[in-house]
């Protein structure tokens, strides 16, 4: 059921919103340090799959295993705690808290996890350097460009030293050049820190930064690894 | 709102000819009105929000506008039922006639509520009637107010029914009542005589002018109005801005299709005009509907008849014109800090830092005006206009000072826990909305603090300290029914009453030295008490006593008083008694009267004077005598006070029973304070409503961000705390400003009227109310916050 | 595009005459370029030689000789292998891919699998190019990007086709 050595695996997920099925028997797995692209047309259930895998929503049926633990059996508080400690997130837009400075945004996951402010902001700055946005540390998100903002978001996702980063159309609001740069920095940083990335995208050139790809169609994930 | 939605209401084609400069104005205003009225669901939501907010404010304005009439109507009814004065002399008695009525006030209390009432006895066949009743009740019957009827019918009030051994034969109509909830009765009697305290009434309706309010009271009333109406104005101004962010975005879409900046402003003004005009209508409807229920509403014992709430027509017109005009002006000024570009909205709030100096000018100018006005004595005519101007300047100045202070103090905050950081950063970015709402709180609280301080200082005069120590006797009963053994009977009755621990009762009168006295001389007078030997032993050190004995009782350790007493109490010489109506009686103090020393009586008071046993004098003939008792009860016995009152009513329905609370409050002042409390509560609720609306608006704008934060694993409590801080910070700063400013203003006002500040801590309840406001707003925004913290917000792409 | 595999695939639904094969081929795939008879016969003889088809019967009289061909088990396997094997990503791939998709439908196979296999192959190449781009200098990057954009365009076509498989199925089996 669960592919050997996988960090996060889902089996036969089903999820219905109202009467429309979003997931209809989807399976998925990702290994430590692996970048997996989840592709598919819009409305195919990509984002729903990502939200289920990240424990943001619970599937109607099916199992999700993370690091030997059943995510599907956890309480909301336990899943929240897991998201704080082990997961990182990058979304398409609107994810930075507009009133916090960039460095405070990056430090936010650490602080939510109980790290002291000074330490959290120091760690945040090193990640911002990695993503080449250290110069905008004390600016507010409204004052930086889209590409910079997205890199700040990537830095934030990495700052909490997660095991898995969930990236939902991380380049969706960017032009090709900025998008490529964000993807390059994200995948390089993730690989060097041995962080797995679940990358939801409908763009092939973004998916090309992955190690492997999974297609979701009509709520079913065609994971070649699973088929094998 | 997207551009596509806008297309449903296409802009009218520009007219080829422009006849006048007013035309574009009218066209844009009309367009704005059309947006407000037909702008799709979202446009409607915004319009409704504004209209309801303005409507609430307008309701209060109408309410305020009808207060003068309500008070007039109340006073008029009160005058109409008070007895017609036949002479300046209060002791003058009218002549008995076919229409005269004897009556005695028979006021009582029941569970902290006062029940007014009279025993009435017609002296002829055509008795005059007080308003509200058709006929005098016969003996053993009574007519009651509807509220008293309800109270009597309540099964839990058996004790009250026992006090009124009369048959209820009718109810008193509204015309005879001060307010709908008034407890009033008229009971018939066939035994009442002038000697037993009955007062002859020749007619009702006091044509004399009501005494004008004391000048200080005028100041208080004006201050109360300012304190209550300023926040309402601020609330209306805030309500006009509801949903402003989205409106701006919509206007940006209009700019994209070619509208110029001036037009967008006019369109926005049109929207505001429509919303506020609708608000005035809603306010009118709310007022008219709410008025029907006003008699059921009773706040701090105050209530009114629906018909009393008739707003002054001129004030109504003023409201109807001023409110929409204010709405337009507020909108136009709010849009000055916003540049609406075709592709979006640019806020230039950051570029303009708030300046302090001109904000300080106003409150300082206010204090200056007060200082120039100077001190005035209590009975001097106060110039209410300077005081009001000064006070209003100070209060408005405080409201202006607040945004600067919030910005300045929040700007310095760094770090702290995550919720605190989120809240402070948010306030740093845009503190204007919060400050505006809170400035309403500031004006209300500062004004209320100042007024309360002034009130407390003046209260020191008006609260007549009665001096009675309630740890001794809680009741003082006096009856003008006097007979030889009345005192003994009264004591016996009261002693047998449940919950009574101590009673002392005697027949009391005043004795003086006969003779003629010039204006400057004081006629020597001392008290004269009749009690049996047992009673006398309790109030004086008497060893032997039999009926017929007489004593001169000197106070303990008070030579002066003893000397003064002996000027009247000359043994073997005459003393004189005189009643209020001038009836005189002379009586010789027996030469064998013994001189003894007084002692503390059982209820804890020192006694002295001439004391005699019932056999020494015929009490029934004694002018100005009354049966007086003092009663101590065991507070732990439930309803002990009610049993005492019942006993008193049984002995003599006309018995005056006074509850010895430490202070007796002047009625006028009590109503000013009541008004202040009612108003401050309503105002704070109003401000809570506007803060809640902006809070919810802000949460809805950030639905997506909230979902992202949930994805991160942010705890609900973290966000709840940040919402709390975000409300609490400006409110706390606002309250601090309000308390400081209010104390300063209050101290200044006290100084002006030459009073000492008696209580510096009067702001505590209001500060507490502010705290409750923070909690209320936070609690009410939590359910929507929970709802928005679901991951649905992530699915918007 | 492989005419041999296409004709083999058409035979899977039942034995047919050469003339039949040509007509069906033209209907489904020929469009503006119909097949020559000669092409059919030469292809069939190659398939016969390789043992992928056999002659089911011969009808004679009143005209040219008409052979009926039937697919062998080896032939069926050959078609399956061909369908499963993604094409090497290159320009103007769509005619081959289209043929494969239609053939998969005609033979009751899953056409989506064909597209998915091809998508994977495209992505594999894109990954290699992306990797090369990451390591290379600007010139490498620009060259790789050119190829990447072309591959991306193909992929979009694949996506679009995948989304329209249901529609296509109706047309093909009509």
Image (spheres, helix red, strand yellow):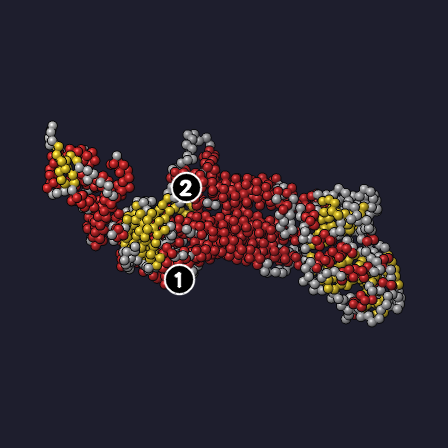
Vertical relation: B468 (above or below) B171? below
Front residue of B419 and A26 = A26
Say the numbered circle drawn on residue B788. none
Query: Vertically, is B603 above or below C163?
Result: below
Residue C26, image x and y in percent?
18, 34
Residue at image mark 1: A114
Secondary structure of residue under mark 2: loop
The spot of residue B207 in percent (x, y) is 74, 44
Circle 1 crowding by C-alpha within 10 Å: few under 14, some 14–19, many from 20: few
**Near-viewer residue (B632 or C76):** C76
Name the residue located 16 percent from the left edge and 40 percent from the top edge: C71
Image coords of residue B241 (percent x, y): 48, 45
Please count the marks in the image: 2
Quadrant where the C terminus of chain C is found in the figure: top left
Whole-percent x, y for residue B74 in the image: 68, 45
In the rendered image of this protein, does residue B390 appear above or below residue B308? below
Residue B766 placement, left or right of A158: right
Question: CA separation, marks 1 and 2?
Answer: 40 Å
Residues at badges 1 and 2 in contact (C-beta under 8 Å)?
no
Name the residue located 77 percent from the left edge and 60 percent from the top edge.
Answer: B493
B332 w.r.t. A117: above or below: above
Question: What kind of element bears circle 1?
Answer: loop
Does the image show residue B520?
Answer: no
Query: Which of A200 and A92 lies nearest the eye of the viewer?
Result: A200
Q: Image quadrant of residue C169?
A: top left
Instruction: Kindly identify which chain the residue marked by label 2 belongs to.
Output: B
Chain letter behind tag 1: A
- In the rendered image, is residue A208 in sight? yes
Residue neighbourhood size for the residue with mark 2, other residues' Cα within 10 Å, grouped as few (<14), some (14–19), many (≥20): some
Q: Disc 2 designates what residue?
A: B1
Q: Are marks 1 and 2 on the same chain?
A: no
Which quarter of the figure is the N terminus of chain C placed in?
A: top left
């Amino acid at each position: 059921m669960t592919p050997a050595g996988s960090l996060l695996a889902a089996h036969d997920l089903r999820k219905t919103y109202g009467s429309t099925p979003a997931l209809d028997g989807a399976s998925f797995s990702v290994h430590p340090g692996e970048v997996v692209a989840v592709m598919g047309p819009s409305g195919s259930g990509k984002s729903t799959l990502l939200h289920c895998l990240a424990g943001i929503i619970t599937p109607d049926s099916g199992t999700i295993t993370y690091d030997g633990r059943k995510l599907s059996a956890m309480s909301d508080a336990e899943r929240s705690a897991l998201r704080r400690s082990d997961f990182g997130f990058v979304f398409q837009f609107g994810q930075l808290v507009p009133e916090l400075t960039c460095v405070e945004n990056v430090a936010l996951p650490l602080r939510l996890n109980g790290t002291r402010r000074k330490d959290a902001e120091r760690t945040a700055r090193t990640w911002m350097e990695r993503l080449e946005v250290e110069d905008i540390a004390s600016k507010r998100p409204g004052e930086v460009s889209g590409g910079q903002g997205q890199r700040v978001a990537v830095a934030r996702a990495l700052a909490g030293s997660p095991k898995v980063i969930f990236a939902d159309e991380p380049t969706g609001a960017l032009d090709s050049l900025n998008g490529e740069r964000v993807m390059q920095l994200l995948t390089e940083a993730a690989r060097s820190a041995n962080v797995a990335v679940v990358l939801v995208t409908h763009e092939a050139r973004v998916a090309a930064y992955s190690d492997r790809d999974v297609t979701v169609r009509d709520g079913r994930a065609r994971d070649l690894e699973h088929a094998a | 709102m997207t551009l596509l939605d806008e297309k449903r209401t296409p802009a009218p084609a520009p007219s080829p000819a422009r006849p006048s400069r007013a035309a574009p104005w009218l066209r844009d205003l009309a367009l704005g009105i059309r947006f407000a009225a037909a702008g799709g669901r979202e446009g409607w939501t915004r319009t409704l929000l504004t209209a309801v907010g303005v409507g609430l404010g307008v309701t209060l304005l109408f309410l305020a506008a009808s207060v003068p009439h309500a008070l007039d109507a109340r006073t008029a009814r009160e005058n109409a039922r008070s007895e017609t004065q036949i002479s300046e002399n209060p002791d003058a008695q009218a002549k008995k006639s076919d229409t005269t009525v004897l009556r005695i006030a028979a006021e009582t209390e029941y569970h902290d509520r006062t029940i007014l009432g009279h025993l009435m006895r017609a002296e002829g066949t055509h008795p005059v009637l007080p308003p509200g009743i058709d006929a005098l009740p016969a003996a053993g019957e009574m007519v009651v107010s509807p509220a008293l009827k309800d109270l009597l019918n309540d099964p839990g009030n058996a004790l009250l029914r026992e006090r009124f051994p009369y048959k209820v034969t009718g109810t008193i109509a509204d015309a005879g009542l001060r307010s709908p909830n008034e407890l009033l009765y008229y009971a018939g009697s066939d035994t009442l005589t002038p000697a037993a305290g009955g007062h002859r009434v020749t007619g009702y309706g006091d044509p004399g002018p009501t005494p004008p309010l004391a000048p200080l009271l005028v100041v208080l009333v004006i201050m109360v109005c300012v304190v209550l109406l300023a926040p309402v104005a601020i609330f209306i101004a805030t309500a006009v801005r509801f949903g402003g962010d989205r409106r701006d975005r919509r206007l940006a879409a209009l700019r994209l299709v070619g509208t110029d900046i001036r037009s967008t402003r006019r369109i926005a003004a049109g929207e505001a005009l429509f919303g506020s005009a609708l608000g005035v209508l809603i306010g009118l409807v709310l007022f008219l509907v709410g008025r029907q229920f006003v008699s059921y509403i009773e706040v701090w014992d105050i209530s009114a008849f629906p018909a009393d709430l008739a707003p002054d027509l001129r004030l109504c017109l003023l409201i109807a014109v001023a409110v929409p005009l204010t709405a337009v002006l507020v909108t136009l000024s709010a849009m000055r800090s916003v540049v609406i570009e075709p592709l979006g909205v640019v806020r230039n709030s950051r570029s303009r830092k708030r300046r302090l100096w001109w904000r300080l000018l106003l409150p300082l100018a206010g204090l200056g005006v007060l200082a120039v006005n100077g001190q005035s004595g209590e009975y001097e005519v106060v110039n209410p206009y300077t005081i009001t101007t000064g006070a209003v300047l100070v209060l408005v100045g405080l409201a202006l000072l607040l945004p600067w202070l919030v910005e300045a103090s929040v700007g310095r905050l760094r770090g702290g826990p995550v919720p605190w950081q989120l809240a402070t950063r948010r306030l740093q970015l845009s503190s204007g909305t919060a400050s505006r709402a809170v400035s309403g709180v500031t004006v209300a609280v500062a004004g209320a603090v100042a007024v309360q301080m002034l009130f407390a200082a003046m209260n020191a005069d008006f609260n007549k300290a009665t001096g009675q120590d309630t740890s001794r006797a809680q009741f003082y009963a006096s009856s003008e029914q006097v007979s030889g053994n009345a005192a003994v009977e009264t004591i016996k009755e009261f002693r047998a009453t449940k919950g009574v621990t101590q009673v002392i009762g005697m027949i009391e009168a005043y004795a003086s030295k006969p003779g003629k006295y010039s204006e400057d001389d004081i006629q020597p007078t001392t008290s004269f008490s009749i009690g049996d030997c047992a009673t006398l032993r309790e109030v004086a050190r008497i060893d032997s006593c039999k009926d017929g004995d007489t004593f001169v009782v000197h106070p303990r350790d008070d030579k002066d008083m003893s000397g003064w007493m002996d000027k009247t109490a000359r043994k073997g010489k005459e003393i004189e008694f005189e009643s209020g109506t001038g009836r005189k009686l002379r009586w010789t103090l027996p030469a064998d009267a013994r001189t003894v020393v007084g002692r503390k009586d059982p209820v804890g008071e020192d006694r002295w004077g001439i004391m005699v046993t019932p056999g020494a004098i015929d009490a029934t003939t004694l002018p100005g005598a009354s049966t007086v008792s003092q009663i101590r009860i065991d507070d732990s016995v439930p309803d002990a006070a009610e049993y005492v009152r019942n006993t008193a009513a049984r002995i003599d329905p006309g018995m005056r029973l006074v509850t010895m609370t430490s202070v007796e409050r002047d009625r006028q002042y009590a109503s000013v304070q009541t008004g202040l409390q009612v108003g401050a509560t309503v105002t704070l609720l109003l401000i809570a409503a506007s803060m809640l609306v902006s809070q919810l608006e802000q949460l809805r704008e950030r639905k997506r961000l909230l979902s992202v934060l949930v994805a991160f694993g942010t705890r609900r409590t973290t966000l709840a705390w940040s919402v709390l801080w975000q409300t609490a910070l400006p409110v706390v700063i606002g309250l601090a400003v309000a308390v400081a400013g209010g104390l300063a203003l209050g101290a200044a006002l006290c100084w002006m009227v030459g009073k000492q500040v008696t209580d510096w801590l009067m702001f505590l309840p209001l500060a507490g109310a502010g705290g409750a406001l923070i909690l209320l707003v936070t609690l009410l925004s939590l359910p929507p916050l929970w709802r928005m913290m679901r991951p649905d917000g992530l699915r918007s792409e | 595009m492989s005419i041999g595999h296409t004709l083999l695939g058409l035979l899977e639904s039942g034995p047919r005459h050469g003339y039949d094969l040509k007509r069906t081929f033209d209907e489904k795939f020929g469009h503006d370029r119909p097949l020559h008879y000669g092409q059919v016969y030469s292809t069939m003889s190659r398939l016969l030689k390789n043992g992928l088809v056999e002659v089911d019967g011969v009808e004679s009289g009143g005209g040219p000789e008409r052979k009926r061909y039937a697919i062998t088990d080896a032939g069926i396997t050959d078609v399956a292998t061909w369908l499963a094997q993604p094409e090497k990503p290159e320009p103007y791939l769509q005619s081959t891919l289209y043929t494969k998709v239609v053939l998969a439908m005609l033979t009751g196979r899953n056409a989506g699998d064909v597209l998915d296999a091809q998508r994977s192959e495209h992505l594999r190449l894109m990954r290699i190019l992306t990797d090369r781009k990451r390591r290379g200098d600007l010139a490498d990057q620009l060259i790789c990007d050119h190829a990447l954009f072309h591959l991306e365009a193909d992929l979009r076509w694949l996506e679009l086709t995948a989304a329209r498989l249901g529609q296509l199925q109706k047309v093909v089996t009509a």
